[in-house]
């Protein structure tokens, strides 16, 4: 019997919404593979990162996005939505994301 958390495969993507549900520059929290993730839209591109700030667990989806970076609402730590990197040396996991037939879909952790 497979383990309950082993239901996915590297090619498994889960739909989290439609493209028109995000305005340009908007971030929103979604839950995928039992994890909270923050999805950001910049122009026609979408990005998905872990939604929990590694500093003190702040909810990144409640922060603001400026110049391609998500800022934690608790202490202002900033993370690049494309790479997950922060100027202070910390980083967030980034997830595979794609758009198909107007739907935004998230996969597994990206290798960066």
Image (tube, rainbow, N blue to C red):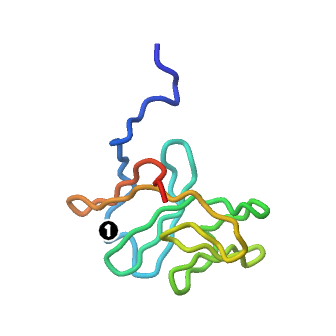
Measuring 44% from the left and 67% from the top, which residue is drawn there? Answer: 47
Task: Tell me the residue that label 1 is attached to.
Answer: 19
Residue 60 coordinates in the image, percent (x, y): 63, 67
Measuring 51% from the left and 71% from the top, which residue is drawn there? Answer: 81
Q: Is residue 65 left or right of residue 40?
A: right
Look at the picture and state if 102 lies above or below 67. Answer: above
Residue 26 coordinates in the image, percent (x, y): 47, 77
Residue 79 coordinates in the image, percent (x, y): 61, 73
Q: Is mark 1 on a helix, strand or loop?
A: helix
Q: In this view, does 31 lie to the left or right of 44?
A: right
Q: Is residue 54 left or right of residue 69?
A: right
Q: Is residue 76 left or right of residue 107?
A: right
| Closest to the observer, 42 or 85 | 85
**Dividing the picture into quarters, in which one does residue 21 lie?**
bottom left
**Dividing the picture into quarters, in which one does residue 29 lie?**
bottom right
Look at the picture and state if 75 lies above or below 16. Answer: below
| Closest to the observer, 62 or 67 | 67
Look at the picture and state if 70 lies above or below 110. Answer: below
Looking at the image, the residue that sits furthest to the left is 101
Measuring 32% from the left and 68% from the top, which residue is drawn there? Answer: 19
Residue 16 coordinates in the image, percent (x, y): 40, 55
Instruction: Judge the density around disc 1: few (<14), some (14-19), many (≥20) Cα neighbours within 10 Å.
Output: some
| Closest to the observer, 42 or 92 | 92
Looking at the image, the residue that sits furthest to the top is 1
């Amino acid at each position: 019997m497979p383990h309950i958390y082993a239901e996915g495969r590297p090619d498994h993507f889960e739909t989290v919404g439609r493209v028109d549900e995000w305005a340009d520059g908007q971030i929103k929290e979604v839950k995928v593979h039992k994890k909270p993730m923050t999805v950001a839209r910049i122009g026609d591109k979408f990005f998905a990162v872990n939604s929990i700030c590694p500093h003190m667990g702040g909810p990144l989806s409640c922060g603001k996005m400026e110049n391609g970076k998500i800022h934690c609402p608790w202490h202002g730590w900033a993370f690049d939505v494309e790479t997950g990197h922060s100027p202070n040396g910390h980083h967030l996991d980034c997830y595979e994301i794609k758009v198909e037939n107007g739907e935004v879909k998230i996969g597994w952790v990206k290798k960066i």
